[in-house]
Image (cartoon, grey):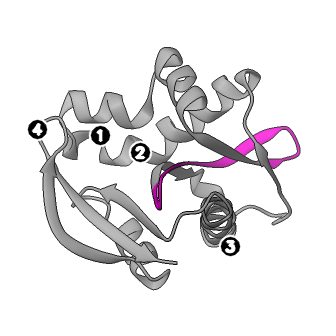
Amino acid sequence: MAQDSSFLLRSAVPADQTGVLHCLAVAFDPYRDDYTPQAFARTVLDPAGYIERLQAMHLLVALSESTIAGTIAGACNGREGRLRGMAVLPEWRGTGLSAQLLSTMEAWLKEQGCHRITLGTTPPLQAAIRFYERAGYSHTGKITDFHGMPLLDYAKEL
């Protein structure tokens, strides 16, 4: 666990690319063997994927001094928001950072007019599933294909 649990949340900028990609890669690396190569690549992103996400979604970063300790992205389409790419560096787990990232993004989506938020997660991410369920998300029963692996749909009414 990180020694100092203070962090700053702000909107991501293009210069955050290296830190965001590092955060995603480190957070998801323990699950690499549970993912198809294509699903893993779409999860951890590459520089082009980062720019696409930055242009298409509202992307937040959590900074501890100059280190990006966490990230989350969200987009609002009409009355429904969608979350993507939430990750926290292992040393920041258990500090409340994940909950702060999620609640900040939920508040932003609500400000955009969203009344419902959805997200997709994969079966290997059991800790993330428990986290989302504690935060009020429920499995919708919908399962889609995410580059050769199941993507479980979760939703929360605001």
Residue 96: image tag: 3
Sequence-earlier tag: 4 or 1 = 1
In the rendered image, residue 86, in percent from the top left (x then y), is placed at 51, 52
Label 3 residue SS: loop
Sequence-earlier tag: 1 or 3 = 1
In the rendered image, residue 14, in percent from the top left (x then y), is placed at 71, 22
Residue situated in front as seen by the camera: 158 or 70? 158
The residue beneath circle 4 is 148
Q: Tell me if residue 126 can be seen.
A: no
Sequence-earlier tag: 3 or 2 = 2
Residues at marks 1 and 2 touching, judged by CB atoms closer than 8 Å:
yes
Residues at marks 3 and 4 touching, judged by CB atoms closer than 8 Å:
no
Label 2 residue SS: helix
In the image, is residue 31 above or below residue 123?
Answer: above
Residues at marks 4 and 1 touching, judged by CB atoms closer than 8 Å:
no
Residues drawn in magenta: 63-81
Q: Residues within 10 Å of mark 2 (few under 14, many from 20)?
A: some
Quadrant placement of the N terminus:
bottom right
